[in-house]
Image: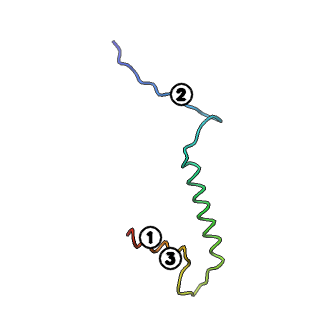
Amino acid sequence: MSAPTHTPGPRVHGANARLHWWALALPALAFGLLLLLLAGSGEAQAASGEGSPLLQVTEQLLHVVG
């Protein structure tokens, strides 16, 4: 008597393959954040005492988490 084998469902390759939601969302989010950083860098001043609003929020988040 042989043991029952479990065979996984059919694998889909090529044009019919489906992506997970995060496979599109994470690169789009990274692109948006980098674009935001580049757009805000035009307003940067070398010797200013206060940072950009994005930098301030990042510092606050790091303070809360760390």
Residue at the image position 60 percent from the left and 56 percent from the top: 28
Mark 1 residue crowding within 10 angstroms, few (<14) / some (14–19) / many (20+): few
Looking at the image, residue 59 sits to the left or right of residue 47; the answer is left
- Mark 1: which amino acid? Leu
Query: N-terminal of the two: label 1 or label 3?
Result: 3
Residue 5, x across and y down, in percent: 40, 21
Q: Disc 1 and disc 3: Cα gap in Å?
A: 9 Å
Answer above or below: position of 26 versus 35.
above
Q: Disc 3 and disc 2: Cα gap in Å?
A: 50 Å
Residue ID for mark 1: 61
Which mark, residue 56? 3
Picture quarter containing residue 26?
bottom right
Residue ID for mark 2: 10
Query: N-terminal of the two: label 3 or label 2?
Result: 2
- Mark 3: which amino acid? Gln
SS class of the residue under badge 3? Answer: helix
Residue 27, x across and y down, in percent: 58, 55
SS class of the residue under badge 2? Answer: loop
Residue at the image position 61 percent from the left and 80 percent from the top: 44
